[in-house]
Image: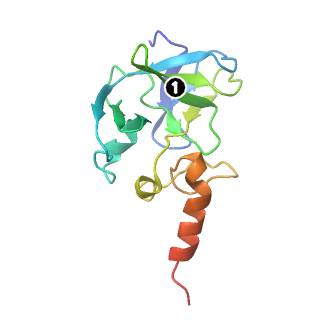
Amino acid sequence: MSPYGVESKTSPIEGLGLFATQSFSVGQKIAPYLGHTTERIDPPSSSAKSATYWLEIKPGLWLDGSFAENPARHANHSCAPNAELIYDNTVNEAWLIASQAITANDEITFDYGFSIAEGLFHPCCCRQTNCAGHIVAAPLRPALRRHLRFSRSRD
Ligand SMILES: [Zn+2]
């Protein structure tokens, strides 16, 4: 049992997802995203499946949340998420914080914040009406759409 109000179970988005076992109000802490931090410029390996556990929590600082002790490791990306990953410099911890009201059994999702280069390796299956089709940070999605439009073969 998680000490937090979350559990991992099969997700309609992909694989296992993180689900609320209680309600959370906007701004409330949900669970820490635990991991090892590494300073580097580029993501570890954009094409690896495990790359979805590597998150750039501030420029050049990467957090690997792939290990079993991370209670939030199964949180999926969504193009319309209900949580945010907030990194607190002062305590060196990243937490999922509710950005929308969450009720028990809701799947908890956040924006992985991937670059376009990373996102091209990771299709998004969030099924939101505004889904960009790839896991890409919200501010980059208009550029992704332009990229995909111009890189499509013409006939
Ligand atoms: Zn999506």
Residue drawn at (39%, 42%) of the image: 52
Residue drawn at (48%, 55%) of the image: 123
- Residue found farthest to the bottom: 155
Residue 26 in the image: x percent, y percent? 69, 21
Q: Is residue 113 left or right of residue 145?
A: left
Three-letter amino acid code at the position of disc 1? Ile
Q: Nearer the viewer, residue 72 or 114?
A: 114
Per the image, label 1 sits on a secondary structure element best described as strand
Residue 3 in the image: x percent, y percent? 47, 9
Residue drawn at (34%, 44%) of the image: 51
- Residue found farthest to the top: 3
Location of the N terminus (image quadrant): top left
Q: Is residue 135 left or right of residue 44?
A: right
**Quarter of the image where one finds residue 92:** top left
Residue beneath label 1, please?
Answer: 86
Q: Is residue 62 left or right of residue 137?
A: left
Label 1 Cα neighbours within 10 Å, binned few <14 / some 14-19 / many ≥20: some
Position of residue 127 relative to residue 88, above or below, is: below
Q: Is residue 57 left or right of residue 49?
A: right
Position of residue 42 relative to residue 24, above or below, is: below
Q: Is the CB of mark 1 within 8 Å of ligand 1?
A: no
Residue 9 in the image: x percent, y percent? 49, 29
Q: Nearer the viewer, residue 41 or 85?
A: 41
**Quarter of the image where one finds residue 101:** top right
Location of the C terminus (image quadrant): bottom right
**Quarter of the image where one finds residue 109:** top right
